[in-house]
Image: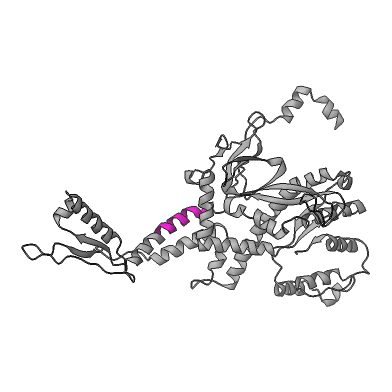
Amino acid sequence: MRRLHKSISSRKQTQILKEIGVSGLRRMGGQIYADPERKLHGTAGMEIYDLMSRSDPIIAGGLLIIESMVEQVPWFIRPGGTDEEDLQAAAHLESCIHDMSVSWNQTVTEILSMLRFGWSYMEITYKIRRGRHERKPQFRSQYNDGTIGWRRWAPRSQLTMWEWVFDDEGDHSLLGMNQRDPLTGEIYFVPLDKSLLFRFRTTDDNPEGESPLRGAYEPWLSKSIIEDLLKTGMERDLAGIPVLRAPKKVIEAKTSKEAEAKQDALDLVTGIRNDEEAGVLLSSECDEKGNPLWDLKLLTGGGQKQFNIVQVLNMYDQRIAGSFLVDIILLGAGRQGSYALAETKNRVLTVAISAILDRICETINQHAVSRLAEMNQEIYEERERLPELAHGKVENPNLEQLAEALQKLGFKAEWADPDGLIENHLRELADLPTESTASVEGDAVQKQSLEKAWQCRKP
């Protein structure tokens, strides 16, 4: 390796170490224009995603399912090694996670806002841990060891993003985000090296990622238009539109009095509703031929509708739910659906959620844990590997299927007797009390003791 290093000229080293190309991200200044749909650019796009997640029952229900499943996932710390120093570093990292002013579950919920917007931005604030009796929050902690821990991971709302700040004089990397205070209008620069940027999907190193709701935008927009038409039709009893015939002088409105009468007529015909205030008062005046000067009728379509509007709405619901893998909530709503289909869809959703949690752990371990280690070198220095945050399974396996699989493999109850570890694992899956494993020796003891010692239990 040393010979290779010496054989490369300084000019060649510079070429190797320096980036030449660019990511190809379409941006102008601090605004991103990666999406071909202009309405979804910048803060306007964030507002549309926010409206989609709050107003559409399918999207809101799907996001609630994902967030609820994530809340049940156990989190634990995986030590970087088996030495005593590795275990101390893991214990310190676990204590920092549960020593923040906001609970870990609430912090994860804030991170999951990327499921709506495609990204979430959190500013890390620190504190010196001087005990629980300190008045100042930058020193208050459950621990009194004088080390530096996390005070909180403060969310920075996507709706307040003013512009992204890039290093245009260097390698065009992201430096941070300018945030606009909605109360005062003041602009704050939140640097990336003091924050965590979580992204649902990354393309061209886009800081805004890509929202999982992007695929639901078109069907959501069409569905919203149809629902508005349906509401209007139901208000008019699906019979047609009201048409008011008025005298010619009122239509022409040459005088102010006639203009006022015309406006009253327009308000009347556009404000007719079939509700508790339904009713129309018209003049009984007729012309010389006996025809009424004022006449109100309903104008209906020339034929019967060639489509079922409810089926159309159901079609768009299916597209919206399928765009981010939560169409399982629609099973049973119609005549189709089976247990096997539900199992398959649930398994696909579980795999997708597990992948999302993997990306969250990668971001935290790469940026948050490494920075915390730099501030507490007396605990983390000279560690070959830093401790890592990891997550458990999103969903426990089906016990009936597990028992059937074990039976087909030829296992019986006696197979768990030698050490008890596998038996305890099965007991945990079944939510049953576990037996003591103090007599277990070797790697099995070490593995279980580490998992037991460093597992982050939910408060």
Q: Is residue 251 above or below residue 171?
A: below
Image quarter for residue 430? bottom right
| Residue 44 sits above or below residue 309 on the image | above
Quadrant in the picture for the C terminus: bottom right
Q: Is residue 320 left or right of residue 229?
A: right
Q: Residue furthest bottom?
A: 413
Q: Position of residue 416 (x, y in %)?
A: 85, 73
Q: Is residue 218 magenta?
A: yes
In this figure, which colouring scheme has been used for the structure? one colour
Image quadrant where one finds the N terminus: top right
Residue 326 in view in this figure: no
Q: Is residue 157 magenta?
A: no
Q: Looking at the image, which residue is at 85% across and 45% down?
A: 376
What residue is drawn where x is 22% and y is 67%? Answer: 281
Q: Nearer the viewer, residue 190 or 319?
A: 190
Q: In terms of image quadrants, where is residue 280?
A: bottom left
Residue 322, x across and y down, in percent: 54, 60
> The magenta stretch spans which residues?
215-226
Query: How many numbered dots are placed on residues in this image?
Result: 0
Does residue 205 appear left or right of residue 334 in this picture?
A: right
Does residue 142 appear in the picture of this structure? yes
The residue shown at (58%, 46%) is 160
Give how far across and how far down residue 140 sits, in percent. 80, 53
Residue 176, picture quadrant: top right
- Most prominent secondary structure in the magenta stretch? helix
Q: Position of residue 329 (x, y in %)?
A: 55, 67
Q: Residue furthest left?
A: 288
